[in-house]
Amino acid sequence: MAKDNKPRRPKAETPKGFRDYFGAEVTERAQMLRNIAKVYHRYGFDALETSAVETVEALGKFLPDVDRPNEGVFAWQEDDDWLALRYDLTAPLARVYAQHRNDLPTPYRRYAMGPVWRNEKPGPGRFRQFYQCDADTVGAPSVAADAEICAMASDVFEAVGIPRGDYVIRVNNRKVLNGVMEVAGVLDPSDPEKFAHERGIVLRAIDKLDRLGPAGVRALLGEGRKDESGDFTKGAGLGSDQAEVVMSFMDAKGADGADTVARLQSLVAGSVTGQAGVAELEQIAGLLDAQGYGPDRIIIDPSVVRGLGYYTGPVYEAELTFEITDDKGRKQQFGSVAGGGRYDDLVKRFTGQEVPATGISIGVDRLLAALHAKGRMGSVAPGPVIVTVMDRDRMADYQAMVADLRNAGIRAEAYLGNPKNFGNQLKYADKRQSPVAVIEGGDEKAKGVVQIKDLILGAKIAENATLEEWKDRPSQYEVPRSDLVARVKAILAGQS
């Protein structure tokens, strides 16, 4: 039998871990980003857009998923350099500030929005490409900068439609955690690299408290944990006394901020680093209180860790507290949509000098999903007004109508498919969610009129009304061609 030498057709499918975004989704994201940018701008932050590609050396090795190839990034070799797609918007900022620091103001306040890529194992709701929306202050050593970031995040959530009471921003300090680890015997201040592997596992375990619960975290602090699929994750190997110190830290949240701070002070007694971290938390709480950001919006919470290894001081995470229903009908809280913290050593990698910095990153796709869950987004956006084509030789007439509508600020298009079947044109308008169709055949042209069809009203009448109601509520009008724009505007106003 002869071999089939026909070229193989490529599969029309999205790569694993990626997805496509269509009209309404893109429009909703753009609108949300504009609302966030207004808040950032009001706080004095300037926009920055960096390259999607960085050198692997500039990006550094900070991703928590260290078991993946190339430390969790998409990388390739070009000549003698290794390049990679950025995995977040913070590492590129460190490079930009180090490269242009003589031309930038200090402190430098910037915000950035765009896609990032991570070479991680994809799963439900976990994609390899996703949008982030960041704001950072570089060159400000005071924790007043951290307090400002938290206040700004609070304003962002309310600006995009997440009301007070449906979110909370939780604040901790990596110095406090380091103090706890010092007390637990997994951090030696004289040799920071000692126990580094174990500390990494501990950090990731604490960061999974909400998902795994205390028992799951305790297992990861010890020998390890087997998940529901049977996969085993090796633990940090801490002894029971060591693990108890870490668990007590996660359980240190008190009735209020003062109670929490008192418990933390007791836990880190004897650690200079830990005591400094507690003092910074006290200062942040005082600054936020002075601005009117109370515990209904921002709280001190020791369970916040943040997985990335470059944080050096205050860390914060924004969580949405309202319930949603999953695919199986179970109720659960929506969870985290943003996080960040202080990373005073990141720019130092380039300059050799410590440069204080702090910032937050908002997961755009997560926040959009939250807005959908709250019913603040997701209604079908109206499509364009469709000018149907009854005579292909008069396309200039139809395009002139479209131009008149567009010049009046109305979204419109002429049908550019095969005009032979008029029914197909109306089917196209239906698929485009068009609110209005404009019709001008030869008879209408001769009389100087056009037919305007209210597609929204027509659909409602066809679904619910009797024949008599059709007569009382016409969904199609004949108007002079000169009244086209005015009548379409009136119909659109009535629909909205």
Image (cartoon, helix red, strand yellow):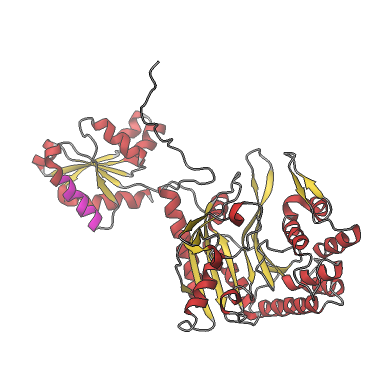
Look at 30% across and 48% down and name the residue there. Answer: 491
Q: Residue 354 appears at what percent x and percent y?
A: 62, 80
Look at 14% across and 46% down and name the residue there. Answer: 397
Left or right: 336 with respect to 491?
right
Look at 83% across and 56% down and name the residue there. Answer: 237
Magenta range is 397-407
Where 159 falls versus 129 (above or below)?
A: below
Specify whether residue 465 is in view: no
Looking at the image, which residue sits at the far right? 241
Specify whether residue 25 is in view: yes
Q: How many marks?
A: 0
Looking at the image, which residue sits at the far top? 1
Q: Residue 173 appears at what percent x and percent y?
A: 72, 71
Left or right: 8 with respect to 85?
left
Quadrant in which the N terminus appears:
top left
Q: Residue 227 appears at what percent x and percent y?
A: 75, 43
Q: Is residue 402 magenta?
A: yes
Instruction: Determine the main secondary structure of the stretch shown in magenta.
Output: helix
Looking at the image, which residue sits at the far front? 80
Look at 57% across and 81% down and name the residue there. Answer: 139
Where 116 falls versus 10 (above or below)?
A: below
Q: Identify which residue, 247 or 100, lies in the foreground.
A: 100
Q: Residue 390 appears at what percent x and percent y?
A: 17, 36
Q: Is residue 290 magenta?
A: no
Left or right: 58 with respect to 332?
left
Left or right: 408 with respect to 363?
left
